[in-house]
Amino acid sequence: MRSLFLVLAVLLAPLSPVLAAQVLRISAIPDQNPERLNRLYGLVAAELGDQLGVQVRYVPVIDYTAAVTGFRRGDLDLVWFGGLTGVQARLQTPGAVVLAQRDVDARFLSVFIANRQALKDLKPFTSIDELSQLKDKRFSFGSESSTSGRLMPQFFLAKAGVEPKDFSGGRPGFSGSHDATIALVQSGAYEAGALNEQVWESRLKEGKVDTSKVVLLWRTPTYPDYHWVAQGNLNKRFGAGFTSKLQQALLNLSPDQPRQAQVLELFGAKKFIEAPVDQYASIESVGRQLGKIR
Amino acid sequence: MTPAGQMLIPALVLLPLLWLLPGAVHGGGLALLLQFWVAALQPSLEPHLLLTALRGIGVTLAIALWSWLLSLLLGFGGGLLSSVAVSQRLWCCSWPALLARRLLALPRSLHELLWGLILLQLMGLQPGVAVLAIALPYGALVARVMADQLDALPVRPIEALSTAGAPAWAALFTAFLPPLWPQVLSYGGYRLECALRSATLLGVFGLGGIGADLRLSLQSLQFHEVWTSLWCLAAVMLLLEWSVRWLQRRWHQPLGCVGQRGLELLLLAVVLGLLLIPSAQLMELRWQELFSSWHWPESLPLWDVAGWMQPWLPLIGTTLLLTLLSALLALAITPWVLLLLCPWNGCRPLLQLLGLLARLLPPPLTALLLLFVLKPGLLPAVLALGLHNAGILGRLLLEGLDAQDQRASEALQLAGAGPRRSLLVAGFNTVARSYLSFGAYRADVILRESVVVGLVGAGGLGVLLLESLSSFAWIEVVPVLVVYAALTLIGEAAADAYRSRLLSGPLPLEGLNPAVGS
């Protein structure tokens, strides 16, 4: 018995630091491996903290829905959302503002990939209609609320006449993240999948994809995706002009500074640019069409 | 049919499952599944990972501890309120108790995960959500069990006290508390184990603690990291199960000197009390925030007819089928494995190890693993729920067999009966009634739990609910919750009816009773 309490005492000993009154809580949809996210947003928090002179804390969330809920509830101040989650979050949070997107985000795309062994007969194609070959295959999306890993792929599949119920087992899988989709298709657990093109390219470059096992089938047309969304009350909480200072800090991230260069590299971008809000109208309409926005 | 026979019958469920199997296997990820098991021997020992795992375990334990204490308090109060015997003493009528009992059925009818998801919407991302999510349904469950026990106590002592002129409250405490006490201790200990499992599961859905690490590292196929968390969780779970068992045994025996038990209880209470503050700090529990800023979604068209237009029949049918198949599977596994392997000495340790693994992995994660080799659909969900619950039921069965008088089976073996025969006749026949009645309780729990495997596309209400939540379609969420609650209340009544037919009378709270609840 005593040993139990000893263990409990040891486990419960590390007390959390007391929170200061005003902390800028940043977060992101968990679209990649958690260790990568921790590294990236740890750096972002440090960088913003230094530039803005406020305490910045990265709050990891476990799924896309939780990020939207946290933002709506006001538990998160600045979130790196995908196209769909960003629209969902802004529809539910009056006053929320879009601060920036990456240079790549205005013309983003997804890729469809397949396991070479499982689908020997499937060759890379260029016409959207060929997506119909994926009928009756074991197919995995990324997260349920992912724009590049679910929403747009499902939209393009529907254009080719493939509904979610047409996949083997009567429904697609949801791997949870883009990295997981690659791993599951590579292993053969799923025969094919769809994911964020940028993650695909960067994993290829890092040599993390076994190209003898996975093959690229098709690149989708482009659509707008990821963006930074901030709460509308930051000026009130952190002082006049804070929101524009925050926006400038993001827009000014430059590859000349070592830490900023690291941030940009992990984001897979050369720089952040301003994001016109009206570009997400198309995402909203696809979201409504597929029932992800009501 | 003999009781032992009834224990073996649920195995008929294997027929439809085996029939479904060939169509569901794809085996594409067999290599991954092998990698997962090989990784069990080589958990990642990187310091920062170990630290993260320890912290995660700490938060999970903290959530379990707080929610457990809160649920006991709620349950104790609720139990007094909904006991007919108490009500008659205090107010000379029984309707307040019956009303309280009906009202308490509502929080009980939703799984703690559903409470978690609802409270998350209302209160935001904070650990207090998990505490309340477990405490509410558990409290209502404890209240029901308490009330059942109170009403089953003999009324003579209290009548004597009342006749002698004792005030109602004093008479209640003097007459009811002492006989109830050992059962409360025994049941309370088991609830803590349940709370640990629930806290882990809530973590899987992002409500804090080690469950999140488990899910993220499993989803990104970092199996060595998965096992770092799993082994930590296993150590804590075993330690907890053993110490609860040890304390229960100790307090059930007459102790050396008068007052010793009270002293030990007091000591335990003090230690638990001392743990409360640091554990609240560890999970950053902030009560004032928890209750200050409730936040309803902007528009909540609760009673819009459109949300009620769902294909209820197939949804409910799938949910019930999933429940039935999983419950039968959970019941069937352990007795059959025991029966087939019992001549072999390593049989019980093997079953104990497998049972621990089954209890350890939350069902949605087992389901994710199964998807490596099975197509999405009903089968992986049934297997995931069935295996997890077999781990819980199996442990009770093994303990029940160990606790019974061994002489009958020894006598049979001396008379020349084989180990299988003596296990059947002397072992199973004695424990069958209580095992089956826990199976009934468990089926009730599985019905609630069926929502948690919505993740793997098992179909049914769980899938609809998770999809509606991720689309923020409140208009659909509310009807699904209402239907779910109605279904579990009916299920509870059916399980009760079956149990009382089996046992004719309320269950004793000792020994084989932890299956109540999660």
Image (spheres, rainbow, N blue to C red):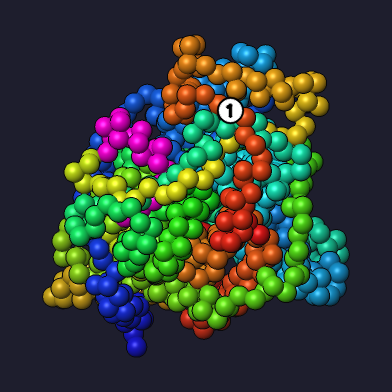
> Which amino acid type corresponds to the residue marked 1 in the rendered image?
Ile
**Residue B399, quarter of picture:** bottom left
Label 1: few (<14), some or many (≥20) within 10 Å? many
Locate residue B417, reporting x and y percent. 16, 76
Locate residue A140, reporting x and y percent. 38, 55
- Residue at left offset 20%, top offset 65%: B342
For residue B426, side relative to residue B95 (left or right): left
Q: Secondary structure at mark 1?
A: strand
The C terminus of chain A appears in which quarter of the rendering? bottom right
The reply to whether residue B401 is visible in this rendering is no
The reply to whether residue A43 is visible in this rendering is yes
Q: Is residue A201 magenta?
A: yes
What is the magenta range? A192-209
For residue B101, side relative to residue A172 (left or right): right
Q: Is residue B94 magenta?
A: no
The outermost residue toward the front is A127
Q: Which residue is mark 1?
A: A273
Q: Nearer the viewer, residue B468 or A3?
A: B468
The outermost residue toward the top is A257
